[in-house]
Amino acid sequence: MVQVNDNYQKLPGSYLFSTIAKKVAAFAEANPDKEVIRLGIGDVTQPLVPAVVAAMHRAVDEMADAATFHGYAPDLGYEFLRSVIAKQDYQDRGCDIQKDEIFVSDGAKSDSGNIQEIFSNDLKIAVTDPVYPVYVDSNVMAGRCGEYNAKEQTWSNVIYMPCTRENGFVPELPKETPGIIYLCFPNNPTGTTITKAQLQEWVDYANWTGAVIIYDAAYEAYITEPDVAHSIYECAGADTCAIEIRSFSKNAGFTGVRLGFTVVPKALVRGGVSLHAMWARRHGTKYNGAPYIIQRAGEAVYSKEGRAQLKEQVAFYMKNAAVIKEGLSAAGYEVYGGVNAPYIWLKTPGNMSSWEFFDDLLARANVVGTPGSGFGPSGEGYFRLTAFGSYENTKAALARIQAL
């Protein structure tokens, strides 16, 4: 008889955002006269900028001509894209990252879930709490997280690093040494971040203990404060302890286009084995490359026109974030984030649980957000709103919440 991977059976319920979608669909069906405003999932709403669209049109024309047609992409991604990434995202910031250390993919979510495959199942992972669910769930599927405690909402073989208002949402170095450390700054879901000096402490810790940091920098384009690092490789010694994952989804609106990349420095070695070589082997075996058309679109993100247009788009979303943060604060809510990230993290009112507030907000204000408890036990009693809606919907949602 065929045996299934029992680790999947350990996962509690469905994926967080699938649960939210089902609840919202049920509400909308029961209340067809209600206009629901969605500020839950971090999906962008502004269209692709003209520089990107023009690049895609040119690439489509190339694909229609036998002389310029492109088939399978190179394993690491096309050199034209990797070269501009290496220069503008890293070398221009003083980071010694080369184009052959960059692996182009279809997005940060895929890489965040897949990167754990190159590590032993015997090691422990450490995650901030609250945390982006993919980090934990992908390790559960691999059989690395032990048993789930439904009451505590924790896994027996996972090291949790609480991020709360008491510690300013800054995780402390774990007392128990992990093998893999997942960090995301600016943070999803709290919208908070740490300084470059604080990040350097994590790099020093990882090099001292032999751990590897998986650094999710998907929201670096939203950084506004000068003492916040855009890349972990701005920290000395990061090339020997860190893998960085980037996305085009939030900085360029590619959620429906799909493009990202992962940086694995050649200097990163554990147990005498090159992690760069391991990821290259995995990447070449299981992935056929992002489409040529999409990679040309990615290249346009780094053009002069693309950078200017996307700077305006990021500013659009951050204006929404400021509206939400200032409006909720004025209404008496305890609010965090929204300065270096497009997320607002708020304390639920009246000691309501995260899901109670979700249901109340949906029923009375017809506004959708994300329950903080869905990101981990330290998220209980908190709620996430995104700034990715239209300005009009953002203002309307805020007015509805203020009227409660």
Image (cartoon, rainbow, N blue to C red):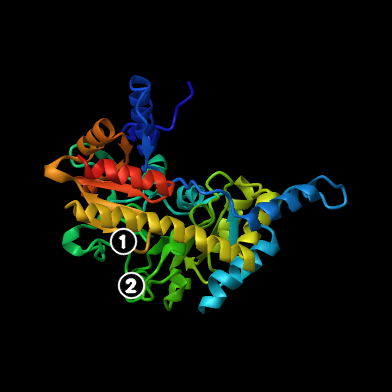
Q: Quadrant of residue 37?
A: top left
| Nearer-the-camera pick, 343 or 63 | 343
Q: Is residue 15 above or below residue 245?
A: above
Q: Residues within 10 Å of mark 1 (few under 14, many from 20)?
A: many
Residue 375 in the image: x percent, y percent? 30, 46
Residue type, numbered disc 1:
Thr
Q: Residue at x 33, y 52 (%)?
A: 189
Q: Is residue 307 above or below residue 61?
A: below
Residue 268 in the image: x percent, y percent? 49, 68
Residue ID for mark 2:
195
Q: Is residue 213 above or below residue 254?
A: below
Q: Is residue 171 left or right of residue 349?
A: right
Q: Residues within 10 Å of mark 2 (few under 14, many from 20)?
A: some
Q: Quadrant of residue 140?
A: top left
SS assignment at label 2: loop
Residue type, numbered disc 2:
Thr
Residue ID for mark 1:
192
Residue 6 in the image: x percent, y percent? 39, 32
Q: Is residue 97 above or below residue 310?
A: below
SS assignment at label 1: loop
